[in-house]
Image (cartoon, rainbow, N blue to C red):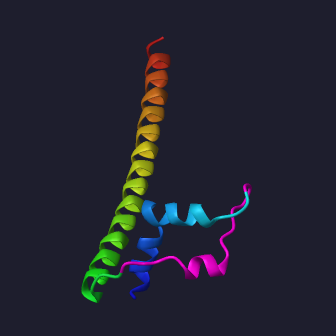
Amino acid sequence: ADPGFLAWYINQSEFQGQLRTVAKGTDTPLVAKTDIQNLTVELPPMNTQALIARLDDLSRRERCLLQAIAEKRSALIRALTQDAARTGREAERNRT
């Protein structure tokens, strides 16, 4: 099995639901090794697994890049508005 595919599969809501049914405890739910061994993972062909893993990786990278863009945009807007406010105050002082 492709490790990236397994990581993707484990994080899917269907599999997470299976984990919740066997988890024990409330604060920090624990799943026994034997319970995990009894869960099934449907494995498509290796090339499909690799494609899914790659797509999932690209999707995560996209989210990180979009977050970085949003942070940079916010910083730019903050800097521009602070500069505009400072310039406006200086212009007002020079007129008086």
- Main secondary structure of the magenta stretch: loop
Q: Which percent across, then down, holds residue 69?
A: 38, 53
Residue 84, compared with residue 63, is above or below; it is above
Query: Closer to the camera, 59 or 22?
Result: 22
| Circle count | 0
Q: Which percent across, then down, holds residue 9?
A: 42, 72
Query: Closer to the camera, 86 or 79?
Result: 79
Query: Closer to the camera, 35 or 53?
Result: 35
Say left or right for 21 vs 87.
Answer: right
Say left or right for 29 vs 39.
Answer: right
Residue at image point 38% right, 67% down: 61
The residue range painted magenta reads: 26-42
Residue 88, compared with residue 55, is above or below; it is above
Residue at image point 44% right, 23% down: 88
Residue at image point 56% right, 66% down: 19
Quarter of the image that includes the N terminus:
bottom left
Q: Which percent across, then down, holds residue 83?
A: 45, 35
Say left or right for 55 vs 60.
Answer: left
Query: Closer to the camera, 11 or 21?
Result: 21
Residue that extends furthest to the top in the rendered view of this protein: 96
Residue at image point 46% right, 75% down: 7
Residue 32, compared with residue 91, is above or below; it is below
Residue 95, compared with residue 5, is above or below; it is above
